[in-house]
Image (cartoon, rainbow, N blue to C red):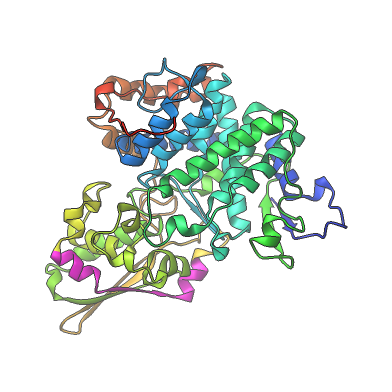
């Protein structure tokens, strides 16, 4: 890996392209390096994972709306929409919008956390959509996905967005553009311009994940994917982007992030080296914010030690800065303690999640978020007894540059009414690559079968699993095999009058 220094330069000092971060990203996207076999297999795992959560969310409100919008944009030789008959094709940017929303809706796919946050699986829907429309092969798609993960993971390692309340999709736009460029084997110049355009158009604030969180949390990454496709299309037509987008005097860094005195260190692989960043990412066993994964496992373990939860006086969670300030009491969001809050808000409340997991000894992607569940009196009482605290030791573990040492867990102290204390800690979720029982191919398949049960037929399930696991051999023009069809009777509609 090469650690690139990224800082702001005045306009009068013209920075050569070869020294710009966008160009360096474009170089690795266009290098045609050998594909790492482990990275290929993990990419297949993540396609299965995405399909699982997308099919499970097909009849949720935001997904219905995104699908209706995509259905209004048919294209003879386009791409396929999850759930819809594969013979019907639509404009790839709208397919990316619809499928991307479906993937993101349940907050149940993969994650990577470092200086910033990300869900790298958000790259997959736009790449599949473009690959289908342009009749690419399975290997082409895999090359694009592996590149997209490489770019997003390394941007997340080097550049913090959330400190400036900028949403993490600002790293997604460039990774989508780079991934598409790699899949289409575009030259460095085109990818460079597309990356700049994609970053410029995907800057938004973190209000989408703050306060009363709405369905836009699911739409936001899909929107970035759509914009990434459009950026590549413009660049392929010879159009340029605002340059240099990272280092310029009025660039994203200068005006929105750390400012003119900034100094970032962004790692990227050497040109023509295998890309393995996808192997550092991790998926979710539970439908909740990633930092909640280890705490759900921890709650399940603590439950085994306490027969009667009524004897609990209070619960203190000592964890990282991020967990405390984003999904803990440090966020100072009253909505995170509101029984009538939206599912999206409860998904970002570790106090609620820990209380339910402690009571139930399990977590369900629908039942655990129901209004009847969040309004249960015993849950509310337990919920309000929970407080989070930042522990610098956990913050240091969270930011450890070594993936094997990086931790997203916590230490929990349960104080009973008789004064006795029960303390347990867990460094990382059981399903984490370095956890107690890391997710393997069979776990991804099991998750797929559980989430798609009674939604798709067994025949369709087995067809998809066979196709995706044979992705390396899928020929050009056959990527529609990655679509999953659902009976039209099972797809709900939104018949409200709209523009499209």
- Residue 424 lies, in percent from the top left, at 30, 70
**Above-or-below relation of 381 to 118:** below
Range of residues picked out in magenta: 377-397
- Residue 465 lies, in percent from the top left, at 37, 26
Question: From the viewer's perspective, is 457 left or right of 171?
Answer: left
Residue in the image at 30% along x and 58% along y: 296
Residue in the image at 49% along x and 30% along y: 94
Residue in the image at 86% along x and 53% along y: 14
- Residue 24 lies, in percent from the top left, at 74, 45
The C terminus - image quarter: top left
Name the one closer to the observer, 238 or 358: 238
**Above-or-below relation of 136 to 296:** above
Q: Main secondary structure of the magenta part?
A: helix
- Residue 326 lies, in percent from the top left, at 43, 64
Can residue 276 be seen here? The reply is: no
**Above-or-below relation of 317 to 203:** below
Name the one closer to the observer, 314 or 258: 258
Asked if residue 128 is among those painted magenta in the image, a careful observer would answer no
Quarter-wise, where is residue 408 in the image?
bottom left
**Number of dots carrying numbers:** 0
Quarter-wise, where is residue 452 in the image?
top left
Name the one closer to the observer, 38 or 384: 384
Question: From the viewer's perspective, is 194 left or right of 44?
Answer: right
**Above-or-below relation of 461 to 30:** above
Can residue 231 be seen here? The reply is: yes
């Amino acid at each position: 890996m090469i650690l690139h220094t990224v800082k702001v330069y005045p306009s009068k000092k013209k920075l050569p392209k070869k020294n710009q971060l966008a160009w360096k990203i474009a170089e690795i996207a266009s290098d045609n390096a050998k594909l790492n076999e482990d990275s290929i297999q993990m990419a297949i795992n993540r396609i299965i994972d995405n399909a699982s959560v997308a099919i499970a969310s097909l009849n949720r409100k935001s997904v219905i709306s995104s699908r209706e919008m995509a259905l209004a944009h048919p294209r003879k030789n386009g791409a396929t929409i999850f759930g819809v008959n594969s013979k019907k094709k639509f404009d790839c940017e709208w397919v990316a919008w619809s499928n991307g929303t479906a993937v993101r809706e349940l907050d149940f796919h993969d994650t990577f956390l470092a200086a910033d946050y990300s869900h790298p699986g958000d790259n997959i829907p736009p790449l599949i959509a473009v690959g289908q429309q342009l009749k690419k092969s399975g290997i082409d798609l895999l090359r694009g996905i592996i590149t997209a993960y490489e770019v997003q993971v390394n941007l997340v390692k080097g550049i913090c967005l959330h400190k400036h309340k900028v949403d993490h999709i600002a790293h997604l736009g460039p990774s989508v553009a780079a991934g598409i460029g790699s899949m289409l084997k575009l030259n460095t110049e085109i990818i460079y311009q597309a990356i700049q355009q994609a970053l410029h158009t995907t800057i938004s604030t973190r209000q989408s994940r703050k306060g009363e969180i709405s369905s836009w949390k699911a739409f936001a990454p899909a929107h970035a994917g759509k914009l990434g496709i459009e950026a590549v299309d413009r660049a392929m037509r010879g159009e340029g982007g605002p340059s240099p987008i990272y280092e310029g005097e009025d660039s994203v860094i200068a005006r929105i992030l750390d400012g003119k005195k900034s100094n970032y260190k962004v790692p990227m692989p050497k040109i023509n080296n295998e890309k393995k960043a996808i192997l550092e990412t991790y998926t979710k066993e539970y439908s909740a914010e990633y930092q909640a994964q280890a705490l759900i496992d921890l709650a399940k373990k603590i439950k085994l030690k306490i027969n009667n939860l009524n004897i609990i006086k209070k619960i203190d969670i000592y964890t990282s800065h991020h967990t405390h300030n984003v999904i803990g009491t440090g966020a100072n969001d009253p909505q995170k303690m509101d029984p009538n809050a939206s599912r999206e808000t409860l998904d970002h409340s570790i106090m609620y999640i820990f209380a339910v997991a402690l009571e139930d000894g399990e977590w369900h992607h629908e039942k655990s978020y129901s209004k009847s569940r969040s309004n249960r009196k015993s849950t509310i009482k337990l919920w309000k007894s929970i407080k989070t605290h930042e522990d610098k030791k956990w913050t240091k573990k969270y930011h450890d540059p070594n993936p094997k040492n990086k931790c997203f867990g916590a230490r929990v102290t349960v104080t009973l009414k008789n004064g006795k204390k029960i303390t347990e800690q867990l460094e990382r979720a059981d399903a984490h690559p370095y956890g107690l029982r890391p997710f393997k191919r069979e776990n991804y398949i099991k998750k797929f079968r559980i989430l798609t049960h009674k939604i798709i037929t067994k025949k369709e399930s087995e067809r998809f699993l066979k196709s995706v696991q044979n992705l390396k051999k899928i020929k050009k023009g056959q990527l529609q095999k990655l679509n999953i069809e659902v009976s039209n009777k099972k797809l709900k509609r939104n018949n409200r009058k709209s523009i499209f």
